Image (cartoon, rainbow, N blue to C red):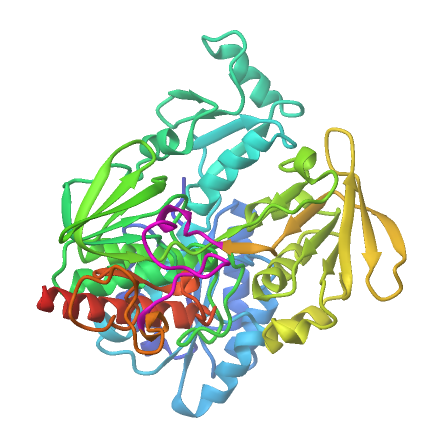
Amino acid sequence: MARPAIIAVDDDPQVLAEVRADLRSHYREHYRIVGASSGARALEAVEELVLRGEEVALFLVDQRMPVMSGTDFLLASAGRFPDAKRVLLTAYADTDTAIASINTVNLDHYLLKPWDPPEEALYPVLDDLLDDWQANRPPAEGGIRVLGMRWSPATHDVKDFLARNQVPYVFLDVERDPQATRLLEAMPTDEPTLPVVVLPDGDVLEAPEPRDLAGRIGLHVQASAPFYDLVVVGAGPAGLAAAVYGATEGLRVAVVERQATGGQAGSSSRIENYLGFPKGISGLDLARRATAQAVRFGAEILTAADVVQLRVEGPRRTIVLGDGAELSSHAVIIASGMTTRTLDVPGFERLTGKGVYYGATLSEAAAFAGEDVFVVGGANSAGQGAVWFARHARTVTLLVRGDSLAHKMSSYLVDQLAELGNVEVLCDTEVVSVHGGDRLERVVLRDGRAGATQERAGAGLFVFAGAVPHTGFVADVVERTARGFILTGPELLADGTRPAGWTVDRDPLPFETSVPGVFAAGDVRDGAIRRVASAVGQGSTCVTMVHRYLGMA
C-alpha cells in the first residue's frame, strides 16, 4: 500500500526545496513528500492522487502565491481530501488572513517563516497534526473486525468501547454483510455468541467483557506494582492532568479508569474554547494527547478497571477493583467524573442500545446517515453532540427542558446550532415515551408551555442529560452532599469545626476530602466549574496539595 502523501506548495523555488528537504529528512519513512511550485500544479497532483486511490495526510501551503493564494488552493482542494490536515506558511503580516482561514478553509495551523530550526518550529507542530490524522484514519484491511447486529445493545457496547479507546475496527452487520456470513461460517463454533470480535491474528472473542477485550487489544489492565505514591481514580481531564503533573514531579502514579481515557470530555466532537487550540480540538484527540503525555512521563494507566471501594488503613489508602485486585498508595485523587443517570421514560429500558443511547456515542453518528435523530440535553455536551450528528443525519432535533439554551450552553455552540439548517431546537420540551419493535421508531414529545404532545418518527435518541457524580464507591468514606458530590477544603469546616473523624491537627487542604490524603478534582467536587480547562487546573493543583500532604506526613 502506498504511503500517504504530504503536499508542500510554494512558488519560491528555494523555499520549496528547503521545505521538501526538511520534510523528507523527518517523514520519508512513513510519508511520500510531494512538492508543487503553484496552486495549479498542486491541484493537478491532488487529482492524480485521487485517480490512484492514494491518501493525502497533510497540506503545507504558502499563503502568498501569485494567481492562486494558499487559502484559495485549500478551498479548491477541500472536497478531495476533507480529512487531510491543513497548514499555511505565512509572513508576519499575513497572520490576520491565517486566523480568518481557520473558519473559511478549516485550517489546522499556520506557521511563520522562517521555520528554522525545524526541530523546534516545524516538526513538533506537524507531528501532532499527523498523529491526529493517523488516529482518525479508517482501519486498514486485516485489522479488528466486529461481527454483530446494528440494533443489539451488546454489539453497541463493544463498538463504543473500541471507539472511545481509539482502537480502529470494521463493523460487519451479520444481517446484511456477506463477509460477516463467511466469517461466521469459518469459525469452529457452530453458533458463536454475538458480538464476535475477530482480532488481527485471527483469534476470536465471543461477547467479550470490557476487561478481557481491553487486555487482548493491548490496553493496560493490571497494575505493575502493589504500592504507589499516588493513585488517581478516573482518567478524564482532571485525572490525566494529575497524572501528568504527578509523574513529572517525581511521583509514582497509577491511574484507574473504568472505560476510556478522556471521560465525558473525550466524547466531545469539538472543544472550541480550550486555550491554545484556535481551531478547537476533538475530545478524542485531546484525550489521546494527554494519555500519551502521561504515559511518556511514567504514569501507569489501567483501563476497564472499575473501582468498587476505598479503604483507609493508617497512612495507607487502598483502592479495591471489581475483580478483587488492590492498589495501595500514600495518597488518592478522586477524579471519577459523572455517570449518565437512566431516565424513567416508558420504552427507554426496552430500547436502550436499540436506538436509545445514554451519554456519548458519537461513534454511532455515521450509522445514522440520512436518518432523523433526537438529542436530549441543554448543556455543552448535548450541543456538541447535535453539531456532530448534523454532519451525518438528515435532521437533528435538540430537546431542551429549559426555556433557553443560553442558561447552560456556551454562546459559540448556540451560534453554531443556529447556523445549521438541519438542526431544530425545541425548548420547554421533554420526551414522555418512545416506541418501536426491535428498534426505535417513534418519539412522543410534550410541550411544557402548552401541555400538548406530538409524535415524531426517528431512528436514534441520544441522552446527554441527567448525569450524577460517580462517587458511590466512597459513599461511606468521605463526606458528600445529598446529590453525591464530594465536599473538599474549606467546605468541610462547619463554623470552624473540622469534619467528624478528622485525624490530623490541621485544617483540610484545598481539594482535600474529609479523609486526610484523599483529594477530589473535577466534576465530582461540590461546586466545581464544569469546563475542561477548570478540570485540568484542578487536577494539576491537586498534585501540589498531594506534595504538601506528603511533606506533612
Question: Is residue 97 left or right of 403 when viewed as pictured?
Answer: left
Q: Quadrant of residue 441?
A: top right
Where's residue 87, x and y in %? 43, 71
Q: Nearer the viewer, residue 47 or 125?
A: 125
Give the dominant element type of the magenta stretch: helix, strand or loop: loop
Q: Residue at x 64, y 38 (%)?
A: 352
Residue 524: x and y in percent read 42, 60
Q: Quadrant of residue 24?
A: bottom left
Residue 429, percent from left and from top = 78, 60
Identify which residue is drawn at 77% across, 30% down: 437
Q: Is residue 369 left or right of residue 295?
A: right
Residue 424 vs 477, above or below: the answer is: below
Quarter of the picture containing the N terminus is top left
Pick the front one: 359 or 285: 359
**Residue 74 part of the magenta-drawn span:** no
Report the side of 491 relative to 386 (left or right). left
Q: Tell me if I can see residue 507 in this picture.
A: yes
In the image, is residue 487 part of the stretch drawn in magenta?
yes
Q: Is residue 227 above or below residue 189?
A: below
Q: Position of residue 268 (x, y in %)?
A: 52, 59
Q: Quadrant of the C terminus?
A: bottom left
Range covered by the magenta-colored residues: 469-489
Residue 25 appearing in the image: no
Rendered view: 265 above or below 436: below
Front residue of this view, candidates 461 and 110: 461
Q: In the figure, 141 relative to 501: above or below?
A: above
**Residue with the most extreme bottom position:** 93
What residue lies at 24% left-to-right and 62% top-to-bottom?
A: 244
- Which one is in front, 179 or 220? 220
